[in-house]
Image (cartoon, rainbow, N blue to C red):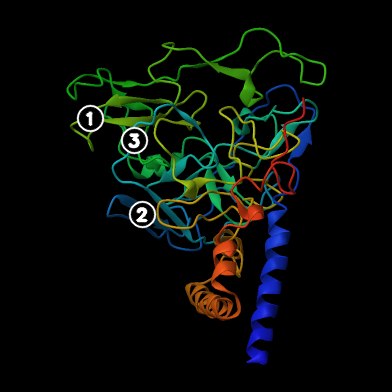
């Protein structure tokens, strides 16, 4: 019995070390002094994936479950390359989104990845590149100001090997035969469960017989110059996410880059998102309630790239980190059970987000699940009923990191 307890204690200790290490989050975002747009030069799609694309999408109860290995169904740029040192590798993506989504009381800022394409590759428009000065000035990945090694499908690779789209997924759009004379086919699902389309929709959203047109964003470049000082100077030219502002009714789409419309997949009508040719290309706000499965880290992100979870205020909406860990240990509880991030429950050996980071096989996950059951049983034998109740919700493990003044409380943003 003592040997068994010692083994379990050692496993728990190892798990805590791994958790502590990963809980430090990704390294600080990379800082730059560039204040002008560059020329985006996408890498040509000359590399065929060395693994087959695998994806399944099915409705289970009130949830749409999307599973994939993250390998695209089209050629990509060559990775690693001079702007991106990472190699594409198979993933274990699982996303659960509402099968019957509803409009929320107010739009929700993107908190990580926006959604997932029908081929199982995530849409992740943010990047961990920031101005070296006043917080909140996040570089727009497609501006060309910073070379991120993006390919012609406007995608590149995180350090975990995760291939993801920052803009129009050209390879995917070719595979679904996007046609300017026809309404866009379904290209993906947003984190809140609403469908995603690309560029082309009906002129009259209530009439499927109306002319098909290119739908435009209602975001515009701000006029004049940036503040300067600790903030970047120069004209608002699209170098930074904050160079843009929403101008109501200046385009076809709302602030979430969507609208209520009839589509070929929803002849009775639905709210739908549209990727656009102009900024933001991939939407950055949700009209419904997003699934926590798409969250990158605790705190999520602001509507235009301000990350509330970092004390320096510089962290990204989607803090991918081209040269560092892709996903911080964050997230809330999702609709299908414990979330993939956030603080683990006491006694948990390897939280879900740690398992995701380690990219465990199904066999390894099963063994850890069995070991976890043994640990839970031993804890029930060791602790009293009152102690077990207390263990369920200790102050230091509450969402948000504890009571005011406790270690782990989210720091206020510096002024």
Where does residue 200 sit, x and y in percent of width and height? 34, 27
Where does residue 356 sit, x and y in percent of width and height? 56, 61
Q: Compare marks 3 and 2 and give the one earlier in the sequence.
A: 2
Front tag of 3 and 2: 2
Q: Residue at x 72, y 31 (%)?
A: 413
Q: Which residue is mark 1?
A: 269
Q: Is residue 314 above or below residue 52?
A: above
**Hey, which quadrant is residue 154 in on the image?**
top right
Q: Residues within 10 Å of mark 3 (few under 14, many from 20)?
A: many
Q: Which residue is mark 2?
A: 65
Q: CA distance from mark 2 to mark 1?
A: 22 Å
Q: CA distance from mark 1 to mark 3?
A: 21 Å
Q: Point out the residue furthest to the top here.
A: 224
Q: Is residue 311 left or right of residue 393?
A: right
Identify the secondary structure beneath mark 3: loop
Where does residue 130 sit, x and y in percent of width and height? 72, 33
Examine the rendering and report whether any part of residue 119 can be seen.
no
Q: CA distance from mark 3 to mark 2?
A: 25 Å
Q: Which residue is mark 3?
A: 178
Which residue occupies the foreground of this view, 274 or 289? 289
Image quarter of the C terminus? top right
Examine the rendering and report whether any part of residue 260 can be seen.
yes
Q: Residue at x 78, y 15 (%)?
A: 228
Q: Is residue 273 left or right of residue 348?
A: left
Q: Residues within 10 Å of mark 2 (few under 14, many from 20)?
A: some
Q: Compare marks 1 and 3 and give the one earlier in the sequence.
A: 3
Q: Point out the residue furthest to the right here.
A: 229
Give the numbered dot on residue 48. Answer: none
Identify the secondary structure beneath mark 1: loop
Q: Is residue 368 above or below residue 235?
A: below
Front tag of 1 and 3: 1
Mark 2 near mark 1, Cβ–Cβ under 8 Å? no
């Amino acid at each position: 019995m003592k040997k068994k307890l010692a083994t379990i204690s050692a496993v728990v200790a190892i798990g805590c070390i791994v958790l502590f290490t990963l809980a430090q989050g990704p390294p600080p975002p990379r800082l730059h002094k560039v204040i002008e747009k560059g020329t985006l030069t996408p890498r040509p799609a000359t590399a065929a994936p060395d693994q087959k694309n695998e994806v399944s999408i099915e409705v289970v109860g009130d949830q749409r479950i999307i599973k994939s290995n993250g390998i695209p169904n089209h050629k990509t740029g060559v990775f690693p390359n001079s702007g991106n040192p990472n190699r594409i590798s198979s993933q274990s993506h699982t996303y659960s989104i509402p099968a019957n989504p509803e409009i929320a009381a107010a739009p929700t800022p993107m908190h990580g990845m926006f959604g997932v394409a029908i081929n199982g590759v995530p849409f992740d428009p943010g990047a961990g590149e920031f101005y070296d000065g006043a917080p909140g000035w996040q570089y727009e990945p497609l501006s060309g100001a910073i070379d991120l090694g993006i390919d012609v499908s406007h995608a590149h690779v995180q350090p975990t090997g995760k291939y993801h789209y920052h803009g129009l997924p050209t390879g995917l759009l070719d595979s679904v035969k996007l046609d300017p004379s026809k309404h866009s086919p379904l290209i993906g699902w947003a984190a809140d469960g609403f469908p995603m389309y690309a560029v082309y929709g009906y002129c009259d959203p209530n009439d499927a017989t109306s002319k098909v047109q290119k739908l435009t964003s209602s975001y515009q470049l701000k006029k004049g110059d940036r503040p300067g000082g600790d903030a970047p100077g120069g004209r608002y030219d699209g170098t930074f996410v904050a160079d843009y502002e929403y101008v109501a009714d200046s385009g076809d789409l709302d602030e979430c880059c969507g609208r209520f419309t009839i589509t070929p997949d929803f002849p009775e009508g639905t709210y739908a998102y549209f990727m656009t040719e102009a900024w933001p290309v991939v939407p950055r706000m949700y009209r419904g309630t997003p699934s926590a499965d798409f969250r990158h880290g605790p705190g999520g992100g602001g509507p235009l790239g301000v990350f509330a979870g970092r004390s320096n205020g510089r962290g990204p909406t989607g803090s991918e980190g081209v040269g560092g860990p892709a996903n911080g240990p964050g997230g809330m509880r999702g609709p299908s059970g414990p979330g993939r991030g956030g603080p683990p429950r006491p006694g948990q050996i390897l939280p879900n987000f740690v398992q995701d980071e380690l990219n465990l096989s199904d066999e390894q996950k099963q063994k850890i699940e069995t070991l976890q059951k043994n640990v839970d049983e031993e804890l029930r034998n060791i602790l009293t009923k009152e102690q077990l109740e207390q263990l369920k919700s200790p102050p230091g493990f509450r969402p948000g990191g504890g009571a005011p003044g406790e270690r782990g409380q989210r720091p206020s943003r510096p002024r």
